[in-house]
Image: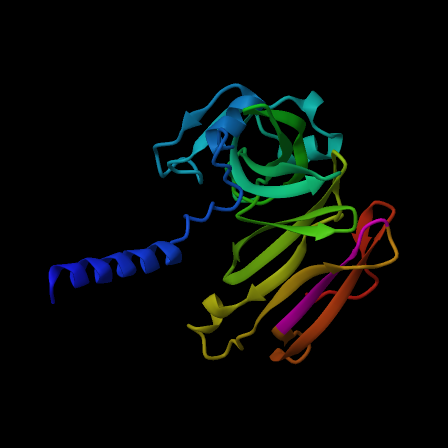
Amino acid sequence: MNTPQYYIIALLFFSILACQWEAPKKPLNEPTDQVRLTDSLILSLIYDNVEKSKEACCMKSYNKYFSTVTADSSEFTQAHWKELDAHRIEYFVEHIEEITEAGITKFLVVLGGAGSSCHACPGVCAGAVFVREGTGWKLEIYENDIVVMGQTGYPVNEVAVARVKDGYGIILKNGGIWQGVNWRYFSVVLYKNGVFIEALFEPVVYSSDNWSNAENDIFTKAYAYTSHIWFEPGGGAFDDMLVHFQGTILDKKNQKPVHLNQKVRFEYKNGLFTTDELLPE
């Protein structure tokens, strides 16, 4: 191959390569032209103090940023303060979700607050909304106790946000093992126009199994069920919430597992999601 042909082929190759190249896609919820809304920035704007955990034995948020706040009863609802009963709270960022209100992009933040660490002690979740202001961020809304739930001082280990009628539904999940039975539960907080609404009177168990007991005892019958949670249009101020339970559950009368396939609809009435249907025990 002579030199002119070589240059022509090379030129064609690099031309094709250039046409196929795409600029790196911007990660979701990560602005490139302004300061990112990081965990440490969020905590600084809300609490004006930030630390980074180092001891794995002391915090769920190992190697993450957190802020320490002195618990003040005046900043809690009476019911939440009675449930929490903590002298100090360590807040850390659990979830950041991009939302839209009145055509404006904002960021909904869920924070977990760790309190006392006894087995039955709950934690607290806080909620905040940030919006861009120039090259920085403005804290629009902050509520330090959108829900009190959890155990061993920690409120939540999984967060999901879904669009609901004129607002957003925040699904908060936690769970644990008690006497060999694994159970997981969720609570729901609704957000609309700067207001957080605790929408369940008490958490709902959405998943359970007794495998820890059954695998070592031939006389114990094993069962396990889980469920899917979503929202769809209804007649209330917010969409209805549906929970579809599937799997097996223990028939206590006969002490044997039976098939479970139950869809439960919760309607939003008088500020809460309620249902007249019986939930799996």
Q: Nearer the viewer, residue 226 or 140?
A: 140
Residue at (52% x, 46% y) in the render: 28
**Place of residue 81 in the rendered image (x, y in percent of width and height, measured from the top left):** 68, 30
Q: Classify the position of the N terminus by image quarter.
A: bottom left
Q: How is the image coloured?
A: rainbow
In the visual, does 129 lie left or right of 38? Answer: right
Q: Residue at x 55, y 42 (%)?
A: 95
Q: Is residue 238 covered in magenta?
A: yes
Determine whether, in the image, residue 44 is placed left or right of residue 244: left
The magenta span reads 237-246
111 vs 25, nearest the viewer: 25
Q: Please say whether residue 153 is visible from this viewpoint.
A: no
Task: From the top left corner, tell me how far across and down residue 45 is, in percent.
Answer: 55, 23
Q: Quadrant of the C terminus?
A: bottom right
Do we see residue 254 in this rendering?
Answer: yes
Residue at the farthest left position? 2
Q: Position of residue 166 (x, y in %)?
A: 78, 46
Give the x, y percent position of residue 97. Answer: 59, 43
Q: How many marks?
A: 0
Name the chief secondary structure element in magenta.
Answer: strand
* Rendered view: 151 above or below 195: below
